[in-house]
Each structure stands twice: as C-alpha cells, then as structure tokens.
Amino acid sequence: MLKPKFIRTVAREIGVAALIAIGCLIIVELLEYASSNMVRSPLQAMDDEVVDLSYHIRRNNPAHSKVLPEDIVIIDIDDYSIAQMGRSQSWPRSYDARVIDYIASGKPKAIAIDYLYTESDSLGDTFINRLSEAGVANADDVGRALSTDHILRDAIQSAGCVYLSFFDDDSARRDSTFEVNKSLPLIRCEGASRKLNQWNHPVLPIAPFSQAAKRVGGINVPTTYDGTVRYYQALAKLDADEKSSSAAANFPIYMALDAMDIPLSSVVVTERGLEHSKEVFIPLNPDGSFRLNWLGSEEKFRYISFYKVWDELVPAEFFEGKYIFLGTSASGLQDLKTVPSRDDKMPGVEVHATAFLNIMNAAYLNEFTNAEVRLAYLALSFIMVLVFLWAHPIVGVVLAFLFYFAYRFTFELWLLPVKQTIVPIASLMTLTLVCYVASVLYAYFIRERRTRFLKNAFGTYVSPEIVKQISKQDQSLKLGGEKKELTVLFSDIRDFTYFSERFDSQQTVTFLNHYLSSMSEVIFKYQGTIDKFIGDAIMAVFGAPVPQANHAEKACLVAIGMVDNLKDVNEENVKLGFPKIAIGIGINTGDMTVGNIGSNRRFDYTVIGDAVNLGARLEGLTKFFDVQIIVSQHTRDAVRQTHLQFRELGNVIVKGKELPVKIYQLLSMSNDDTMVQTWLSHWVRAFQWMESRDLPEALECLKCCQSIMPDDLATYYYIKTCEAYLDTPETFDLLIRMESK
C-alpha cells in the first residue's frame, strides 16, 4: 500500500509539472507569435528545413495511387532541342502545331502548354517597313502570309484537349476589365475572396488560340521567403473588391476538373477551399494556395525532348491515355525553380505537373496549426517536464537531446512520408528546449533551494549521500529536537597540550587539518554525522539525522577505522617532523535529544543528554586503562555483528553519576590470531573468578594474560587489585569509581 507521504510527493510533483508545462507552452506560443511578425520567421525557417529534408529522405510518395507519375509525360524544350532546331523564340508556330498534332494522334487525355502565346508570330512592323523600303509590293500581305498562327490554331482546335496559359504581369497597372475577364473560365466565390491573392494584370493568349483551347489558366508559381517553391497558387481573384464573386485558376486545376468530369459551374470557392457538392475538392489556404506533395527521390516524371516528338522519333501510341505537359528545361529560357525535394532546380512545368498529380490523387498533406495541436503539445510538455524533474541533470541533458531528435526523426521518417501529415515541428523542438530549461531552473531555484540549505547546514558534518537522504525527507529544519536512541562517539588526541606547546600555531593548524580530514573520511564512510570539532577532539553521532538501524555497529566500525587511519597519519607526521600521536575513543548508545538547538538566529544540529555525557567520560577512561577504544554495555548489546571483539573492563561509576556502567574495550578486527584468542579466554576466566571472589584463581589467569600481553595496563591494574584483597576477598568488587573526568 502506498504511503500518504509518497502520494503527497507524487501529487505535488504532478501539479508542479502541469503548471510548468502550461507555462512552457505559453512561452513557445509567444515565441511563435513574435517569430511570425518578423521579416523572416526563424521558427518558420526551421519548420521548412525539417519538411524539406523529409522530402529529400522520402523515396516514394504513397499518396499517388490513382494517377501515377508514369501517367504524366513532359515534352521538354531542352538544350538539345534548341541545338537541333535553333532559338525557340524564332520557331514558327507550325513547330508547336506539328507536335500537338502528333501527340493528339496518340489520343492523350489532355495536353497542357506551359509557355505563352500572347503575340502573333507574324513579321513585326520593323521587318514590314524594311520590305517596303526594299520595293516589295504588298509587304503587309507578305508579312501576314508568313504567319503560322492559323496552323497552330487549327492544331489546338483539332486536338480538343489543349490547355493554354496566361501570365500575370505584376509590373503593369492593375487591369480587371470585363473584356479581359470574360475570356477566362471563372470560378464562383462564396465569402472566401477576402484573403485570396489577386491577379494583377492577366495577359492571355491571342484570341484565336484562347478560343480554340479547351481552357486557359494561369501559370503563377510564387516562391517563399528563400526563393523556394513550397506552395502552389491554385487560384486568385480577379479584382480588389472584397465582395468579388469570381476567381481564375492555374491551368492544372481546370485540367483536373475536366479529367474528373466536374462541371465548372458546380465548383465554388469557400473558406475551406475549392468545393464540389459541398465537399472539399481541393483544401486551400486563405490565399488560395496549397502545399505541394512532391514525388519521392526514386520517382520521376517521364521527360521527352521536344525535338524527338517533332521529328516523330517517339511512337504516337506512347501518348495514349496520358496527360501531356509541354514546357522547358533549357537554362536560357529561365523557367527553373528551386524546390525542396531535390538539390538541382526543377523546370516550372514539372511544378504544374506535380500540382495536377496531387489534385488527381487528392494527395494533400494534413497540415496542422499550433492551435490545432495545442492540447497534444501540452500533454507532451507535461510528460517531458515530469521526466526532466525526476531525472538527474546530466541525464536530463541526454533525455532532452533524445526527445529533440526523436520528434524530428519521427516527423522526417514517419509522420510526413507515411502519414502525409505536417505539424509545427519547430514549435515542438523549441518546446523541448524550453521544457528542459524551465525544469532545470525550477529544480535549481525552487526545489533544490532546500537541498542547498541542507548542504550548507550539514555539508561539513555528514557525507554527500546523507545530505541527499536528508533532502528527501518531507521536513524542514526548525528549532527544537526529539528524543531518539542514538550512538555518540568521542575521540581525543592524548597529551595534545604538550604537542601544541612544542609547535607554533601555524604548524599546529597544519597538523590538525591533516588529522581531522583523515578521521572525517572514516566517519563519512559509515554515514556518521560530525557534530563538532572541539580543538583536537571529534564528536560524531550515528543514527541521525538519517535513521540507521545499526548505528551502534557503524560507530564501532568507525572507531576501528580511525585507529587504522592513525597509522597513516603518524607516518605522514614523521615525514613532516611531527611526533607520533595516540588517540582515545569513547562510544555510548542510549536515548538522547537530537535536533537544532540554539537561538532563533543561530542554532546547531547536535545531541544532548546523559548518554552523550557518558560517551565523553568513556573517552577519558581510555587513558586510565591505556586502551584506544572503550564502549559501554549499551553499545556492546546493540552490536549484532559477531566479528567485532570486545574485552570486558569492569563496572565504572564516572564522575557525576551514581549508577555504575559496564564498559568494554573494542579490539581491532585484525586481532584474531591464536595468541589473542588465548589471551581473551584467560581474561574471561579471570573475570569469572573475580566475580565469584576467588582471587587466587583470578590472579593465575591474569598472570597468564600478562605473560601474553606484558604491556597491558588493565591486566596490571587488576593484578594489583586482586593482590590487595587476597586477605579480605569478601570486600572485593569490580567497581571502579572515577573522581575526575
């Protein structure tokens, strides 16, 4: 069952994450708004970069399934054709008529021409005047006789499926007269013309061609801020009136309507796009454009040189049932476009062919705005913030990069290529960065503020691991304490006064820093808390502020470690010219008050109580017995590890106390050889004899101990005590009364 504290913590984290996520989303939307008002939007540029790369990566476009790229053929006025036939501007219209007649004989579905017939190919006035000056009679008739416009007109009319082009002269004065408009196939608008782009000055093919063609449409291919074609201008309105009720389209739209047998009169432009029977036929942006869905890198339209068709090198049957586009890729004719799907430039005619293919297959991209994905982005933002808050900062950096590239790769490799969907990916990638930064700032300035305070309060007293555990506790530091069973350790350098008198203060500080650092490392190793340094003395607490079930055992292990580290300290002292030192350590376990004790303005985390005072007295007893570590009966009983060895030293009444306490010497874990074990067994039997007041037997055991450890002061003390009571054993006891601290 989950603990209420855990539930509260999780609920708080979720609430904080939700607030941060909302804030991050608001920041990103503000950035999006600011970016959209710039001359060149940084976020839009990032979006376009990712979308463009997706087109480069995609091999095939699965949306083109009804009409395939193979169903479209581009007759190309390429450099080869110009090399064979001369400058295209000098070609008579009969060349085009011959090509149209030949293609039409193969029974194509449609023929679209992406170049202009806005002037007659008859001789100009300059040439007519030259003929007249040369004495040629009827020069005007000769000029008209050389024109082949009528041949082209007949070819267009005979084919019955030719779509011609007009261009929008944006350098001319805007002209929307009825005489121009009536030659165009118009599309009715219903409340959608307010934001539609507008034709400035449509320049149509000359009347014979316009009348012979099946439809006449525009060839406008606008580019975005960087000169790249990303959107196709499907249609535009004919005048500046917001209530304008008509628009003219580019020729692929008319081709598609006719190919699908949709009457022009049944089509209407609405706010949703081009509709037929109240269903969207072509979804359009407010300006009348739609995003082009380009071919994959392994797909292409079939290109055939204009010259090869003119010379009938291609069987006419090849064109049967196909959609034919006539255009140019010759570099000198300047109809090459920068597109996102390829590195080289694309002929403008292929842009029109792509638009037609998109319309025929309804291969439109599902493009979402920021408003439409707001809830989804908020959910992702919430998840990212939760992850960043719970992760380590370094792990958070890695996760932020993983999120960033996961979103990008998902978009580039799956969302656009497979699902035909575009989302504001730049906003999502920016949101990832904002979520990470916001999470780090919150963690540092809000959540980690308490941790930093605890580090300041405990950092010099406990190990970093303990500080982390303290910071996880759902409690704040406040004045006051609580009673707990803990273990306290006191250590002191023997005869330090003599040491400090021999060396100046600077040398003493150097020595103390080295000694205290070495001892502190042992305390931190076993998760102890350094309560304070009192000159050369150390006071450490175990079991607080983080509870420890085996605090007595850890204190004993620290004491043994301090004795072991003292050897290294003494070796270093000799090298530095300092004398070797000895230390005494006292350990006691018992109930004591622990907490922040002091005033409201200045307090320390410490322990107080009789059990603390007894620990300090036990440290003083190490001098009396000339041993390094003494622990109380309470500590001995609390230790569960059997590998720790203790030697009973008797019962002691320390100064200021009335009740005796049994004390033990803690032996180093290295003292486990046979001789030591023999020595300990004699010592145990000696105490058993002394407790029964059989002093002769006790003396015999003690002298056996002395023979093994001749320098042991405790053995010497009890030998002298037993000898003093041999005549009056009934008055003997093991109680030691200490009159000094």
Image (cartoon, rainbow, N blue to C red):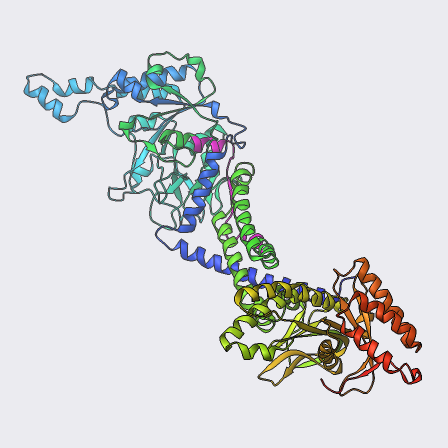
Q: Give whichever of 314, 154 is nearer the camera.
A: 314
The magenta stretch is 354-378
Residue 395 on image: x %, y %:
57, 53
Q: Answer whether residue 369 is magenta in the image.
A: yes
Left or right: 185 in relation to 731: left
Residue at image location 54% in from the left, 28% down from the top = 65
Q: Give whichever of 192, 620 is nearer the camera.
A: 620
Q: Is residue 695 above or below residue 204?
A: below
The image quarter containing residue 314 is top left
Q: Answer whether residue 675 is magenta in the image.
A: no
Q: Is residue 527 above or below residue 426?
A: below
Residue at image location 37% in from the left, 39% down from the top = 228
Residue 360 on image: x %, y %:
49, 31
Residue 279 visible at all: no
Residue 221 on image: x %, y %:
36, 37
Q: Quadrant of the C terminus?
A: bottom right
Q: Is residue 459 above or below residue 431?
A: below
Q: Give whichever of 494, 700 is nearer the camera.
A: 700
Q: Quadrant of the N terminus?
A: bottom right
Q: Give whichever of 226, 327 is nearer the camera.
A: 226
Residue 702 on image: x %, y %:
85, 71
The image quarter containing residue 681 is bottom right
Left or right: 739 in relation to 443: right
Q: Is residue 83 above or below residue 541?
A: above
